[in-house]
Amino acid sequence: MKAVCPGSFDPITLGHLDIITRAAAQFEEVTVLVTANPNKNSGLFTVEERMDLIRRSTAHLSNVKVDTWATLLVDYTTAHGIGALVKGLRSSLDYEYELPMAQMNRRLSGVDTFFLLTDEKYGYVSSTLCKEVARYGGDVSGLLPEVVVDAVKQKYTQQ
């Protein structure tokens, strides 16, 4: 079965990478889908930059590919014959947010959502928090893939 790991990934974190790696071990093909989130601002990285960072961070996973989509997620899954969504859960707050979306996606297209619990060492890690720390010169190594640490530093140096 093919699966999608959707998200804004601005930027990809080691928590995201852990979920993607674990999904890749369970599904024949995993697409990391960079989606537009209307509830978030335009972001630190462009969609193309995010996709490049994800490709570089997942290069060791032969069954992972990267794509982007700007409309309903279920339209993507239907168009590409994908039967599963994979989402990571850090806490009950993530569950409360993800559950209605999973139910709506199932209602709209029949696609199932598989929830993977985040490894405890990444339970507090979010792209937003990492950007906040990096913006003020804090160390985000060990929270982001190394290629992403460098890219984040470069972005904030340019601002």
Image: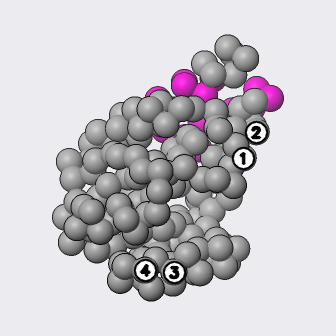
Sequence-first disc among 3 and 2: 3
Reading the image, the residue beneath label 4 is 108
Query: At which x and y percent is residue 89?
Result: 56, 70
- Of marks 1 and 3, the one in the foreground: 3
> Mark 3: which amino acid?
Met
Query: At which x and y percent is residue 61?
Result: 26, 48
Reading the image, the residue beneath label 3 is 104
The magenta region covers 136-153
> Mark 4: which amino acid?
Leu
Nearer the observer, 83 or 21: 83
Label pair 3/2, CB-CB below 8 angstroms: no
Asked if residue 16 shows in the view, the reply is: no
- Residue extending farthest to the top is 158
Label pair 2/1, CB-CB below 8 angstroms: yes
Which class describes the residues within 10 Å of circle 4: few (<14), some (14-19), or many (20+)?
A: few
Reading the image, the residue beneath label 1 is 129
